[in-house]
Amino acid sequence: MLTERLEFAPERDAGIFSAVPAAPAVFLLRSNDAQAEPYVSKTANLRRRLQRLLGPVEERTKKLNLRDRVRSIEYEPTGSDFESGFMLYRVLRETFPKTYANRMRFRFAPLVKLHLENQYPRASITTRLGRLNGRALYYGPFQSRTAAEKFMNDSLDFFKMRRCVDDLHPDPKFPGCIYSEMKMCLAPCFKGCSDEEYSAEVNRVQAYFDSGGESLVREFSAQRDAASVNLAFEDAAALHVRLEKLKPILSQFPEIVRRLDRFSALIVQPCHLADSVTFFRVESGIISGPAVFSIQTAEHAKSQSMESRVQAILDAFPPTKTRPVIETMEHLALLKRWYYRGRRIGEIFLADDKGVFPMRRIVRGISRVLRGEVPEDDLSTKTQIRKGSEEIQN
């Protein structure tokens, strides 16, 4: 997994330190004692970190020093913090299969779960995945549980699917709850609707989450236009108000949130090699890679377009195999940790419902990553924040 290896001897430390790059890397130090645990970490400057860990012992210092205990150094250069984090995860998982999760300090990604296996489906927030081949659907990752709950609850206000968490045994004598009294639930608990009507409402909710809210926008827009054509202006005005209330809710919907079994993305990261970037593929929450993409000179690029070369790299990624549920949760946690950080390095591009990637946007993104520019979605977010501030001031 770590491609570079050096034997360490204290008397040759100067030559060894000069042989390693002063650049980001993930490294592993093996001890002279076969029973001792290896030391695994990532660093922004490998040479400086090894000089601190393996250099001559300083007097009156409490710094960790492994100079007399290490026999070999293994390392892998990386081009970004995302690549370092993912590589560190893989090395820790292989080296410490029982304790790697505690070492990584995972905070699992919040997801909206649609309980389709229930006779009367409902939605909830979870950080745990169930059986990946089950009927339940998962949408995410969200930044926090609070953000996921707010989006789910605000969205469900436009539907009449139940909010209760109990397994229902419909009884006409049951008094119902506040949602049924407010006409915000079809009340299957006391047979306030037929099973077919409730199933149709659940399908509307699923279409809403599948499309990122676009299905409801289209539905309200079509109903409003039809009401206007029929001169039912009061109904059209009411539908327009509902449409306006829906827009700020959809603005809470991060671009990265997708139905998990349809999640397909390409992450472009800086590379430690010159004139290159690094690709990572995400399929159903599982990250694969890295794959180095070299930028050809103009003479070599004439025979093959950049879009076709990107597509060739994507096609070369091995098919995603079925992984344990916990591994999917860990990969989603890594993805969430990178995507929602304050200043994100690299860019992510999501495929559409047919699995087609936006090639022109990817090519422009590769250029931005090479030049170290701000990602496209960061620019749009900053523009929205600036416009919102201007509106408040006015």
Image (cartoon, rainbow, N blue to C red):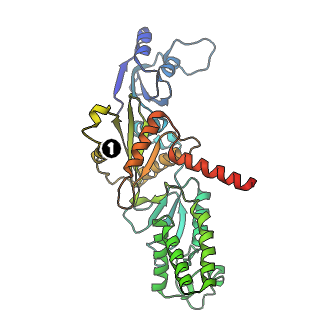
Residue 214 percent coordinates (x, y): 49, 67
Q: Quadrant of residue 246?
A: bottom right
Report the residue at 50% width, 14% height from top. 55
- Residue situated in front as seen by the camera: 304 or 15: 304
Q: Position of residue 80 (x, y in %)?
A: 46, 34
Which residue is at 29% across, 51% downward? 319
Residue at figure coordinates x 24%, y 38% from the top left: 303
- Foreground residue among 174 and 226: 226
Q: For mark 1, what is the residue?
A: 310
Neighbours of disc 1 within 10 Å: few (<14), some (14-19), many (20+): some
What amino acid does circle 1 point to? Val
Residue at the farthest left position: 303
Does residue 372 appear to the left or right of 278 in the view shown? right
The quadrant the C terminus occupies is bottom right
The residue furthest right is 393
Image quarter in which the N terminus is found: top left
In the picture provided, is 317 more to the left or to the right than 242?
left
